[in-house]
Image (tube, coloured by chain):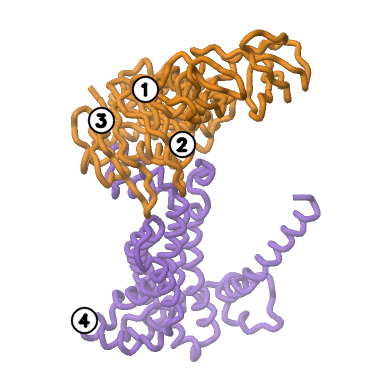
Chain colours: A purple, B orange
Amino acid sequence: MTRPSRMLAYGAAALLTLFMLLPIYLIVLAAFSSRAAIFDYPRPLLPGGVSLDSMSYFLRSYGVVPALGRSLAVGGLTVVLSLLLGCPAGYAIARYTFPGRDLAQLLLVNVRAFPLAVLAIPLLVTFIEWHLYDTVLSVAFVHTAMSLPFTVLLSASVFMRVPVELEEAAMVMGTSKLGAVVRVVLPNSIPGLAAAALFAFVLSWNEVFAAAVLTQQSTTLPAQLVQALSNSPLPFKYAGGLALTLPAFIFIFFMRPFLFNAFRGVAGAR
Amino acid sequence: MAEIRVEGVSKSYLGVQALDDISLTIQDREFMVLLGPSGCGKTTLLRAIAGFETPDVGTISIGDRDMRGVPPGKRGIAMVFQSYALFPHLRVAGNIAFGLRMHRVPAGEVAERVEKAARLMQIERLVDRYPSQLSGGQRQRVAVARALVMEPQVILMDEPLSNLDALLRLQMRAELKRLLADVDTTTVYVTHDQVEALSMGDRTAVMRDGRILQIDTPLAVYDRPADTFVAQFIGNPPMNVLRARMAEEGVELEGHRLPLAEADGRRPGEEVEVGIRAENIEVLLDREAGALEAEVSVIEPLGSHLLLTLQLGAQALKATTRIDFSVQRDQRVYLRFQPQHLRLLGTGWSGGGDSNSRSPAPKAGALPG
C-alpha cells in the first residue's frame, strides 16, 4: 500500500472504532459515576470521580446475579450444543455430495427467515409437556435452533478449506475416518469454529424474545432487564447496560487468539 | 514380501471408465512407475491400491493378502501426496511421528525413529518448525520422511516432485531413487513426467483412458513402444511417427524402399506407421545410396546437440546431430535409417511384461489425475 492510502485506511478504521466504542464508553463512564454526576448536563466526557455505587446497587438488586449466571449457562449450553450438532452437519455438506444437499443448504438459511414469534406458542406448549418450561435448558434449545444454520454453514466453509489429503494422509498412517477428523481436521479448523462459537454465544446473550416467553422465574439477564429497565432509575439502567455488553466483550476477548491463526500460517501450509 | 497384485480391476465414475480391466503385478521391492497423461487413471489406480477407492470389480492384494474391505491404515502402506499433505498444526517432528503414535509405538522408539528419518532426509535442523515455515523442497523432504519412518512394505507416491521447481526436482529425483533403493519397500510412483518414469523406475506402466498400454522396463518402453501413443508420449523429442506403406520387403516411405529388421505379418500395400527416434536418424550432407533426401526447416541448438526439424516429402520429422554439425536452413540433407531402429507401431512390439499391450481406444471424457 502506498503511504497516503495507508493513512486513509487507518483513518477509516479509527473512525469506525470510535463509532463503535463511543456509546460503550459513555455507558461505562455513567455506570461508574456517582448518582449525582449522572444527572449532570452537559455530560462530562472525562471521568470525574469513580464511584461503585451504581454497580453495587445493580448487583445487589433482587435476582440480578442469578440471572447473570443463568445467562452464562444458556450461552455456554448454546455454544456446546450448536457445535456438537452443527459441526457434523457442516462436515457432511463440506465433504460429501448427497441427494438433497443443495436443498438442505437452502432450507438452513430459510430457518432464519421464520419468525420466532410464530414458533413461540407451539414451543411453549411442547416445553410445558416435556417439563422443560421455565428452565435454562429450554432457552438453550431455542437459541441452539437459532444459531444452528449459521454454525452449519460456517463450519462447512471451514472444513472445505482443510484439504481432503490431510485426512487421507492421517488415515494412511492408521487413524479411522473419525480419528482423522478429530486429530487433523478439527485442530486445523479452530479459528473458524471459534468464530461459530462466538456467534452462538453472542446470539444467545442478546436474545430476549424466546428467553422472555419460555421462562418465568429462571429468566436470563437480558430478558429480565428488558422488563425491568424501563421503570428503573437511571443509575440502574447504566449499570444494567454495562452488564449486558460486558460478558460478550469478555468472551470475544478470550476467543480473539483463535479467530486469527491459532498457530502461525495455517493457511500458508498447503 | 509385499508383492502387489491387481487383477481385473475396473472402476467407473458417473459413466466414465476410470479404470478398465487393469491387471498388473508389482514385484516385491520393485519400483513401478505409473505414467500417463492426466485423466488416464493412474492416480485412481494408486488410490485403489491405497484403499481410498473401491474397485467396481476385480481384486487387489498386497503381500498375498486380499485388500477388500481393509482400510488404508491397515494395509502396511505409506503414501506421499502431491500436495505433501503435511499437518499444519503439528511441527515437523510431530508430523513424522504421527503414524508411529497412531500405531502405539512406545515414545522412546518414536523419538529414535523420527530422529533417524529426519537425519536420512537431512531435515534434523527443521524438526521444531511448522510446515508453513518450510520451503517447498523442505516440505517435500518432510513428506518423504513421514512415509519412510513407518518402514512400510509399500510406498505409494502421487506425483511427489511436481510441485518443485526444475532444479530441485532434478536433485530430488536422484535422491529419491537412491533412498528408495536403500529401503526394502515396494514403490508405486505416479507421474505424468516421462523423464521421471524413464529415470527412476524398474518398470513403467504407460496408461491411457483407464487402460495399461504397455508395461516394461523404461528402456524397452522408450525403444520399443507398444503403439503410436506410447511412442509419442515418451521421449523428448517424441518418436517420429511416419506414414508408410508395407512393401514386398520392408516399407515404402515417401517413395523410398526401407528394409525392416523384423517382418510383422503385415501384407504388402497395407498402410502402417513407422516410428524412429530422432537420435537414430543419421543426417548426411552428401547424397548416398539408400539415403532419403530431406530439407532442413528449423535448426535448434540445444547445447549438447542440434535438433533439426526436417521435411521429408509431405511429412515432418525431427533428428538430432552433433552440435558442430554445419547445416543451413532450407539446405538439402540425406537421411539414413538403420533397419534395426525402425519400429512398426501398434502391432504388438512390446517386449516382456505381464500385461498385454493394447492399441489405444480413443474415448471422450477425461478424469482428473
Which residue corresponds to mark 3? B5
* CA separation in Å, label 1 and label 2: 18 Å
Figure quadrant of the C terminus of chain B: top left
Q: Give the mark count.
A: 4
**Label 3 is found on which chain of the structure?**
B
**Label 1 is found on which chain of the structure?**
B
Closer to the camera in the image, B24 or B182: B24
Tag in front: 4 or 2: 2
Q: Could you tell me residue B297's position as x and y percent?
A: 73, 25
Which residue corresponds to mark 1? B31
Tag in front: 1 or 3: 3
Q: Do tag 1 and tag 4 residues touch (Cβ < 8 Å)? A: no
Figure quadrant of the N terminus of chain B: top left
Q: Could you tell me residue A132's position as x and y percent?
A: 25, 80
**Residue visible at 46% across and 48% down?**
B364
**Label 2 is found on which chain of the structure?**
B
Is A109 located above or below residue B280 in the figure? Answer: below
Q: Please state which amino acid type lies under the numbered disc 1.
A: Phe
